[in-house]
Amino acid sequence: MKDIPVLRFATIGAAILCSMINLSAQSTTQEPALAAVSNYPEHGMVPGKRMFHIGIVVRDIEKARDHWGNFLGLEKSPEIVMATGDSKNPTVYRGHPSTAQAKLVFMNLDNPQVELIEPIGDEPSSWQEFLDSNGEGVHHIAFAVKGMGEAYLEKYAEAGYAAAQHGGWATGEYGYVDTLAALGVTVELIESYNRQ
């Protein structure tokens, strides 16, 4: 049964590539607009309509990186980075502080990035919860936003999509919104403060 992980990655890869083909016809030069009470919900929950990346939770990031690198034909293996949280933007998981950490790999494509995530340690997190409940697979789709703390998380909560996990790093923040039951996948909102 050694071929099952390769088949799983090929199946996930095919689904991602099909979704990217549908997204590639849309303009990707505009920055996302801030959510505003006046255009919610008539204009949707993600005004910019631009997917940033697709996050896949894995058990072994080195192995997954190699499989994905071969599948995509990457000439160089992407670096593994550590997500360790930030004291100025601490991680909160389901309403409680968390020191959750993960290893991350970002694979840049012409369309959305592919993000691989391996949870590490014993702290509860959205990543570990997904891995324990579902095994490896697509955990989230991410949308780049501006003003996340000022507007987005509150608007999602008002619409019935609570923040499952929120945290950040020195120059940005992320929030996983609990949309799994409604959309079949978790939505991540991500903001880089340096992005112009």
Image (cartoon, helix red, strand yellow):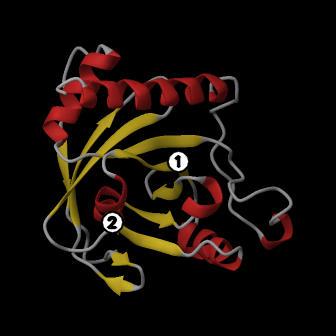
Q: How many marks?
A: 2
Residue identifier under label 1 = 196
- In the displayed structure, would residue 130 be above or below residue 51? below
The image position of residue 79, as x and y in percent, is 18, 36
| Residue at 43% across, 53% down | 194
Q: Closer to the N terminus: mark 2 or mark 1?
A: 2
Callout 1 amino acid: Gln
Callout 2 touching callout 1 (CB < 8 Å): no
Q: Quadrant of residue 114?
A: top left
Q: Is residue 5 left or right of residue 178?
A: left
Q: Is residue 118 left or right of residue 168?
A: left
Residue identifier under label 2 = 129
Camera-side residue of 116 and 169: 116
Q: Quadrant of residue 84?
A: bottom left
The image position of residue 38, as x and y in percent, is 85, 69
For residue 71, say whether it is visible: yes
The kind of secondary structure element at disc 1 is loop
